[in-house]
């Protein structure tokens, strides 16, 4: 380029951050925003990325908590269903006459609807 300073910070739809700068993103941002680079201090790019990350975390954290609660509730519900099923005989273990009785009960039930 012809002596042009350029900096780009792009956030993808997947919330990934991509940067390009000539000579560097930090150099361009420091030049135009008047930020003096000090040793041990994060660059402006790092601050932008960190702010974006923290903002996303503020949004995502409650959603994660809600999902964890939902998973816990569903796990408890599933365990309760398993406990209820323990007392019932498996259909594979029933005798033919017992299956015929169940069939008759089902037929009677549906004919009364």
Image (cartoon, rainbow, N blue to C red):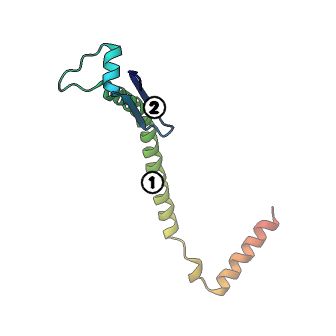
- Between 59 and 101, the one lying in front of the other is 59
* In the image, farthest residue toward the top: 34
Q: Residue at x 40, y 25 (%)?
A: 7
- Between 13 and 95, the one lying in front of the other is 13
Badge 2: residue crowd in 10 Å (few <14, some 14–19, many ≥20): few
Q: CA distance from mark 1 to mark 2?
A: 43 Å
- Between 21 and 71, the one lying in front of the other is 21
Say whether disc 1 or disc 2 marks the residue closer to the N-terminus: 2
Residue matched to label 2 = 10
Q: Quadrant of residue 96?
A: bottom right
Q: Is residue 59 left or right of residue 26?
A: right
Residue matched to label 1 = 76
Q: Residue at x 56, y 83 (%)?
A: 93
Q: Quadrant of residue 10?
A: top left
Q: Which numbered tag is attached to residue 41?
A: none
Q: Nearer the viewer, mark 1 or mark 2?
A: 2
Measured from the top left, where is residue 58 in percent x and y? 40, 31
Q: Residue at x 51, y 64 (%)?
A: 84
Q: Tag 2's secondary structure? A: strand
């Amino acid at each position: 380029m012809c002596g042009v300073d350029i900096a780009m910070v792009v956030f993808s739809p997947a919330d990934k951050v991509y940067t390009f700068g000539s000579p560097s993103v930090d150099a361009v941002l420091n030049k135009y925003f008047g930020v003096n680079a000090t040793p041990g201090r994060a660059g402006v790019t790092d601050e932008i990325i960190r702010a974006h990350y923290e903002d996303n975390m503020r949004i995502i954290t409650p959603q994660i908590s809600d999902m964890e609660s939902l998973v816990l509730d569903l796990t408890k519900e599933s365990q309760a269903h398993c406990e209820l099923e323990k007392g019932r005989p498996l259909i594979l273990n029933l005798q033919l006459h017992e299956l015929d009785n169940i069939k008759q009960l089902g037929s009677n039930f549906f004919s009364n609807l």
